[in-house]
Image (cartoon, grey):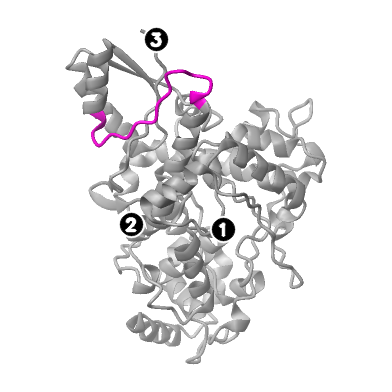
Amino acid sequence: MSLEHFCYVHHTGKINFLEQELKLNTASKVIDYAGWYNLVESLQKSWKNAEFICAANFFEWMLTFAQKNNISSFIIIKPVENYVFENILKLQKKLKKQNIELEMREDTQSFFISHALFEKQYSKPPVMENFYRYMRKKFEIMVDNDWNPEWGSWNYDSENRSFDKKHQATKLFSWDKNEGLQKAEAFYNFELKIFQPTKREEALLMLNYFVQNHLERFWELEDAMYQNDPYVYHSMLSTSINFGLLSPKEVVLRVANTDTALNNKEWFIRQILGWREYMYHFFQHYKDSMYLRNHFEHEADLPDFFWSQVEKSDMNCLTTTLKQVQDENFSHHIQRLMVIGNFSLLTERDPHELNRWFFEYYTDAFEWVVSPNVLAMSQFSDWGRLATKPYIASANYINKMSDYCKNCSYNYKEKYTEDACPFNYLYWAFVDRNKTAFEGRQPFVISNLKKIDVEKVQELKSKFMKKL
């Protein structure tokens, strides 16, 4: 019997990372439901036996289906999500006892290379820049005939530190809600606040929109943050790529083949071909120990304003970013790293609770990308396996890269007064407590610490922490 079946399994909404209960945010479930509904609808037009199936118990459904149709084996694509993969392994064993084979085939769409190939190339994750150059050469992306980078440079990271004070709000791509999305929103009684593709056709249109309208300035304002424009020129494609509506390879090739300056292309491509790909393999290599590490031994709970808009922070950058995430389940990477992550590290929040928060709030949150970015990069809880230094900053950085400070009750220029921006004294209090984290990579930070009134910043930090 030849059948092609596609199954959507309704989530319970709860996942465990080493027995830590996590809840999938409703926005992700809406996109997931609508995406599968639209996929099966399109497949039914060409594949007679495609079905949309909701099952409370995957094993019971597969067993009943196999017995009813006299099937002795199933073929599935190996899940990229670790918790799903672990559950599939358990399912495989249970089906085996019923004389039913479950074969997993490698996912050739979600990433450029398999983890098996990565491990064959590297005994452990290398420096990300070296991996990025390896990938550029392997897939012949922006290299010449001698495997050297076009224009002579592998990356232009030092040039994307601009903030345009005259920047006008970005016009986002939008589209009418398709039937699958309408059904998903009705099922969960939840409305998506910003457009997220749930059909491949929509994702392709959104990719084209980004290339035609935003790519040209993405490089310049990639790290900029604006009070009234949280999107700037970002592609907003991470959810579409992570949910499988677009393959990372087709996105990279689409951008690589555009007629625009090389630095525009390189900055964007590095995020996918380099960073995204690297995060997946880094996670797969260290997933067994990642959740066991907390180098700084930070244990404080996240403030209530992370979980509810009823409570608010007095820091405008933090309030603005958190409200955006709570409303739209989105913020761009600098808001995640240098506002939310920066605050959490400097105020000694439990990195594993922060990891849970990211997973529960962002629609593009998958374990393989959230955990290494939050635990290893943002919170430095693995003591340098991924990052070479803690990613922290004082108010000067926030002011330089955003317009948040001009609408804040705190003064970004002050260090020691009561109205000084907390990022200033929190930064130096952290450096004072963790000097060894900076001595090798940033000795100038330790040198500048000698100019700081350490007792005063510690006093201000103590007062601030009591208010949280």
- Determine which quarter of the picture holds residue 331: bottom right
Task: Quote the CA–CA distance across marks 1 and 2.
Answer: 21 Å
**Residue 39 at what x, y percent from top left?**
49, 32
Above or below: residue 58 compared with residue 300 = above
Q: Looking at the rendering, in which quadrant would you find the N terminus?
A: top left
- Of the two numbered discs 1 and 2 on the same chain, state the one appearing first in sequence: 1
- Of the two numbered discs 1 and 3 on the same chain, state the one appearing first in sequence: 3
Magenta-tinted stretch: 43-59
Tag 1–tag 3 contact (CB < 8 Å): no
Quickly name the residue at label 1.
332
Under mark 3, the amino acid is Ser
Under mark 1, the amino acid is His
At x 53%, y 38%, the residue is 277
Under mark 2, the amino acid is His
Camera-nearest label, 1 or 3: 3
Quickly name the residue at label 2.
352
Q: How many labels were placed on the picture?
A: 3
- Label 1: how many Cα within 10 Å (few below 14, some 14–19, many 20+): some
Circle 2 SS class:
helix
